[in-house]
Image (tube, helix red, strand yellow):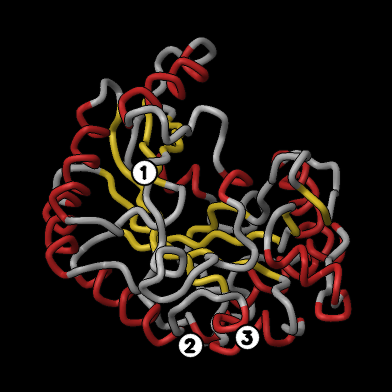
Amino acid sequence: MDKYYKEFADFLSLHFPYKVQKISVNAGFTCPNRDGLKGVGGCTYCNNQSFSPGYGSTQLTVSEQLRDGISFFSYKYPEMKYLAYFQSYTNTYDSVDKLIALYEEALAYPNVVGLIIGTRPDCMPDELLDYFSELAKKTFLVIEYGLESTLDSTLQFINRGHTFAESEEAICKTAGKGIYTGTHFILGLPHESREQILAYTGKIANLPLTTIKLHQLQLIKGTVMAKQYREHPEWFHLFDVDEYIDLCIDFTEKLNPDLVIERFISQSPKQLLIAPDWGLKNFEFTAKIKKRFAERGTYQGRLFSK
């Protein structure tokens, strides 16, 4: 079997006749569990430096960040086009006028052919959703909701500030407007068993999702969770790489076969990472997981049931 799961690159190739690359943008937002609206301190695992590349500085404008990001890639792939990925913090959490101005600035930048907007399920006002609905008719657009877990007890423990029911509602409303809708989960959050993680798949089985991202729990310096790990290591199970690969395959077997899997792991900067440090680049992990799919003779959706 050539394809063990639906890959994001194949999904993009249905939309673009050329190679496209995401460029991360940090537009200087915050989150409602940081600024006091719902809480303070943010998610317990979060140090935004861990997923913001060097060119994603809030000191630079959106256009300047796109310029720097594109210059990084374009020397090798001069024909490449780009997706502006609003990644850091909650990228729908500001006045609608200001948000739209930032999105339009990104789309106006040369060779930017679409947007990916990362946000929270409790931060999508109807007015903004109406804008996205119209935008999706004209350009490539994915709204990516950080769910992280389907368990409300976990969401409360990690200080997310929203429930899984709010996630379901946001996904249904967004997809109902004709917008590609994605989600993101962290596998291995404190107090969650393997069985509870695999049960995510049943909770999202009937949701109108287009894409899904998975990644392993990473303990990052300077976070509340790093302190919790020092004081209560028994709350955590940090996967070794082979164990995590098998978990991902078990998870994928139960997923809707139509879901596009964007990634299985994330890489935090080595200087910020406490554990687990697998010493693998993304492409090396992908090769390992495909080899394990082949060894197990399995594929996405093999055990899927609605």
Count of numbered badges drawn on the protein = 3
Q: Is mark 3 on a helix, strand or loop?
A: loop
Looking at the image, residue 100 lies above or below residue 232: above
> What residue sits right under mark 2 in the picture?
306
Query: Residue 44: x percent and y percent?
Result: 62, 68
SS class of the residue under badge 2?
Answer: loop
The image quarter in which residue 120 lies: bottom left
Q: What residue type is labelled 1?
A: Leu
Q: For numbered disc 1, what is the local secondary structure?
A: loop
Look at mark 1 in the image and give the residue it sits on.
14
Q: Residue 186 location, x and y as percent? A: 63, 67
The residue depicted at 81 percent of the width and 80 percent of the height is: 235
- Residue located beneath label 3 in the image: 199
Q: How far apart are marks 3 and 2 (CA)?
A: 12 Å
Quote the CA–CA distance across marks 2 and 1: 26 Å
Q: Quadrant of the N terminus?
A: bottom right
Residue at position x 54%, y 86% in the image: 202
Q: Nearer the viewer, residue 172 or 191?
A: 191
